[in-house]
Amino acid sequence: MSYYKIENLEQYFKHYKKSVREPRKFWGKIAEENFVWYQAWDKVFEFDMEEARFEWFTNAKLNIVKNCIDRHLAKRGEKTAIIFEPNNPEEKEQRISYNDLYARVSKMANVLKDQGIKKGDRVCIYLPMIPELAISMLACARIGAIHSVIFAGFSSSAISKRITNSECKFVITSDGSFRGNKKIPLKPIIDEALLECESVEKVLVVNRAGIDIKMMEGRDLWLEPLLEQASPNHVAQVMDSEDPLFILYTSGSTGVPKGMVHTTAGYMVQTAYSFKNVFDYKENDIFWCTADCGWITGHSYIVYGPLLNGATTVLFEGVPSYPNPSRFWDIIDKYKVTQFYTAPTAIRALMTEDYSYVNSHDLSSLRVIGSVGEPINEEAWHWYNDHVGKKKCPIVDTWWQTETGSILISPLPFITPTKPTYATLPLPGIQAVLMDDKRNEIEENQIDGSLCIKFPWPSMARTIWGDHKRYKETYFSQFPGKYFTGDGALRDEVGYYRITGRADDVVIVSGHNLGTAPIEDAINEHPAVAESAVVGYKHDIKGNALYGYITLKMEGEYRDRENLKKEINQYISSHIGPIAKLDKIQFVEALPKTRSGKIMRRILRSIANGETKDFGDISTLINPEEIEKIITKTI
Ligand code: WT7
């Protein structure tokens, strides 16, 4: 029997049990039957939880792009692999067949190779959502270079930190991008970032927006002429299972972003498997995930998961509100999308628009609708169910992380009965557990605890680039022998999981995972600022928004507080990016601190959420009198 596709609930339980009792057989069979390998593995896995060392499909040889493209050519050469829908609905879409994709990826691979990129080199990709983004990722993987995609909303200083951390040799970017009615220059941001990066030898530039930019002699090259001359054939590089496939940065509780390293075989097997099951993928489906390839969701469910299954995947350059709030519904109707995967923040924004925008469209092609990125609140769940799914499409509320590589907890459509706000059950292979404060596993249901995974899974990140110690400490030390997700969760009476939110100093704003520490670092650079504490508070559309409590060094010199707030937000924009701006800023005399000098963020979080009583144990505070002052006044 095949384990690749789960057909019903009974089978789900059967596969789940098999995956726990005989994980080698379970994953070994999936890997063997659904992919092409140059050479088989010696062992399905080997690990050491204490040292946080993991290997899957040890010593096997493969190329993930051969699995994404080449092996489909005989049967699906003419089938559309990628539908590119431009920002402007007046601009014609591109339909890239598997044959075309093979040629375009091969050309890009040849250009990278000719320009000097070798296996193991890091390539930074800083591009808008255009076909070249997916093609660059695939071209890197094809030649064995490690891609590091940086979301095109990040600022130059955020970029230079990331490029420096992974010592990228090349950058692939574009002159600019289109977003809604805006034209945004990108190349100048890279130019500024590169003033501080020594590793970068070349910058390859896509001409997307027709913006006049400066090209640096000897470093910058336009891509089109190089691609035109390149051969449309390329033999994929033989890779080891554990060769890094990509680095993707995510926020942590300290200032330095964590470069999560994903490797080749395990990531391939599980993204393909989860895509097939979570979206009930069938041969003629049109799959659309609205994420950006700058995030893990785009890596796994716009590019790798769909292509590994020979699917047609939609790549959308624009935003949900342009030219009007029907854009998503127009696209679903235009391409007869069968699976639609988006984020709660987008749903909440579209929900505030007139019903006619969504109800005037034919959405009858939809079969499965998905949500990812943060807990989906009950109201948004129902709106999504009623108006988009028309009560006929199961909602898959998928829980996972940059670190997990693929979806770990989710309903299986038409199989798992859904329940609003619940991500429901772990997929086969995922041994989820809840832990209490004393680090004991919680056996009973209807209790909440810290969500951990107690057995490795193929697509887990293997390390933090250049900092294995931090990887070990962040994920494997709080609950020894287990992977700690950083999330709290609740388990209901039947064992369904509901994710309740982050247990650390990470705030999810509009689905973007933001560490508060780097934001505070940026604020503290402003000459007027003495200290700052950033916390999240509940926000109707964004899920959470950021609230900054700030003490000042030179109160007198900055009497214009509104202007100071603007300046502080400009600091944040230029250090991290506009996504990390504070919605509320309060200047205070002092921050509540413990005797050991730690800011008590828990209290600030409560105040930001309007809770001004019952702060729990404040006996460790050195200045409890500040709490009342913060509640009642700003300076
Ligand atoms: C954090 C990971 C994984 C793709 C996008 C985010 C939160 C993610 C859900 C969900 C509740 C969710 C968690 C998680 N999260 N999906 N369905 N329900 N919370 O990736 O940036 O690495 O963020 O997003 O808090 O830990 P990421």
Image: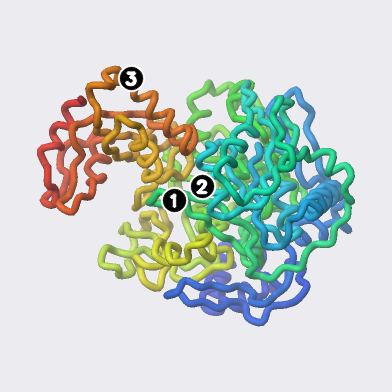
Q: Tag 3, which secondary structure?
A: helix
Of the numbered discs in the image, which one, if any, rests on residue 256?
1
Say few, some or many: other residues with alpha carbon within 10 Å of mark 2 (under 14 / 14 to 19 / 20 or more).
some
**Which one is nearer the viewer's eye here, 193 or 20?**
193
Relative to 339, 535 lies left or right: left
Amino acid, disc 2: Lys
Amino acid, disc 3: Glu
Where does label 2 land, which residue? Answer: 161
Q: Quadrant of residue 580?
A: top left
Residue 73 can be seen in this image: yes
Where does label 3 land, which residue? Answer: 562
**Which one is nearer the viewer's eye here, 399 or 359?**
399
Q: Position of residue 228 (x, y in %)?
A: 88, 42
Amino acid, disc 1: Val
In whole angstroms, how far apart are the C-alphas of marks 1 and 2?
A: 8 Å
Q: Quadrant of the N terminus?
A: bottom right
Say few, some or many: other residues with alpha carbon within 10 Å of mark 3 (under 14 / 14 to 19 / 20 or more).
few
Residue 385 can be seen in this image: no
- At x 26%, y 45%, the residue is 601
